[in-house]
Amino acid sequence: MNINMYDPTRDYNGHKDEYMKAITQVMEMGDYINGQPVRELEEQLATYSKCKYCVTTSSGTDALLVSLLALDISYGDEVITTPFTWISTAEVIALIGAKPVFIDIDKDTFNINPNLIEEKINCKTKAILGVSMFGQMADYIKINKIAKKYDIPVIDDAAQSFGTTLNNQMSPYYNKIVCTSFFPTKVMGGFGDGGAILTNDKELAHKMKSIRNHGQSLNKFNHQYIGTNSRLDTIKAALLLVKLKYLPNSIERRKEVAKYYNKKLGGYKSIQCPTIRKGYESVYANYTIIVPSKEIRDTILNKMKEVGINLSIFYPKSLHLQPCFKYLGYDEGSFPIVQDICSRVISLPCYPELSRVEQDYIINKLFFNLNCPLSSR
Ligand SMILES: *Cc1c(COP(=O)(O)O)cnc(C)c1O
């Protein structure tokens, strides 16, 4: 058997006719940029997320970039964020000349530790950019309480958590700006790059729509802001409209897959299954476990590969140790929890079309092909 972290062709094959029809329609319309499906998708995404406005973008990274630009964050400003995330989160802060200020994470949820935020706030702090890691929201109740005190906007990098809730509310209910990604492996994965920004702030929504289109205002050739070309292609929007129809279903399936892992792997001392806190849910962009050591982790990776199972490490290296952020002056030991977590996490395939047979294969190989340092129930 050969199992990868994700197989995007399964969803395509499952709804092939609808996808092909969507493509054909756009091709025949000829409206390849900012066509009707883009506006339709924005409306539906806003409705789905129970918020007022949605601005689609060419990627999740650009959703973050456009958001920071819309908040006028620039040289000399600081943005508080987590070093345990995909590079985009911190990259866009640095790209516009601002400084990413990292803080450590909660060791169980992998999300930013809200108790460490306040001590990093100063007059240069212009935003808090949290990440809802692996499908579970960061503690945005606490984070927004702190942010409100200092009148700082909170952005949720929800690239991995589109559709998730906290106390039955979606992220835009708590946060000024929510950014997500439609990269194929994400929960709402599309066919190529894509992203979206969600907000209840009318002015910001208008500004973001303008910025993603070269800062043009309603009349063409009038450039109100310094902007970008961060538009989502019509053809991708049309495909995402099909995808969105099945999203509630696929989130349910992800939860079922996760539940089965919990049942089979839970209770073993040497495996820490994902911790979902009370009131939270996870849409399981990933099913990430923690094992006792880096050595065990690397053994598992290799042995699983030998039997055709390709696992992933999200993330093997904290951002504060990446060469591109060396200038920030952090070093080994700056964020002990992130560093420890980076050496011991391992993510298992967790996607809607993963079959029970495949899942059993993964679980069995995990236990039995390992000469198992794991089975200490
Ligand atoms: C995937 C991801 C992004 C970037 O999204 P792209 O669409 O690939 O640009 C940003 N942040 C996090 C946490 C992600 O997982």
Image: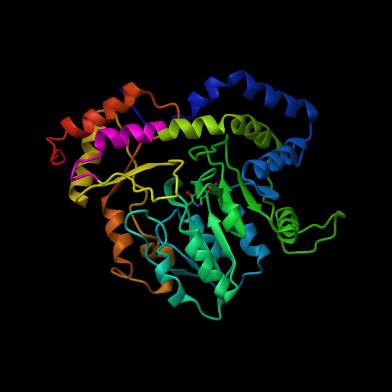
Where residue 336 sits, quadrant-wise, is bottom left
Furthest residue toward bottom: 123
**Residue 127 x %, y %:** 56, 68
Can residue 225 be seen? yes
Name above or below for residue 357 compared with residue 362: above
- Which quadrant would the N terminus be assigned to in this image? top left
Q: Position of residue 318 (x, y in %)?
A: 36, 59
Q: Residue at x 44, y 64 (%)?
A: 324
In this rendering, position of residue 7 left or right of residue 331: right
Quadrant of the snapshot with the C terminus: top left
Query: Overall secondary structure of the magenta stretch?
Result: helix
Range covered by the magenta-colored residues:
256-271
**Towards the viewer: 71 or 31:** 71
Image location of residue 172, percent across then percent down: 60, 53
Judge left or right: residue 226 versus residue 129: right
Residue at 12% x, 35% y: name it.
371
* Residue drawn at (60%, 54%) of the image: 173
Query: In this rendering, is residue 218 above or below 17?
Result: below
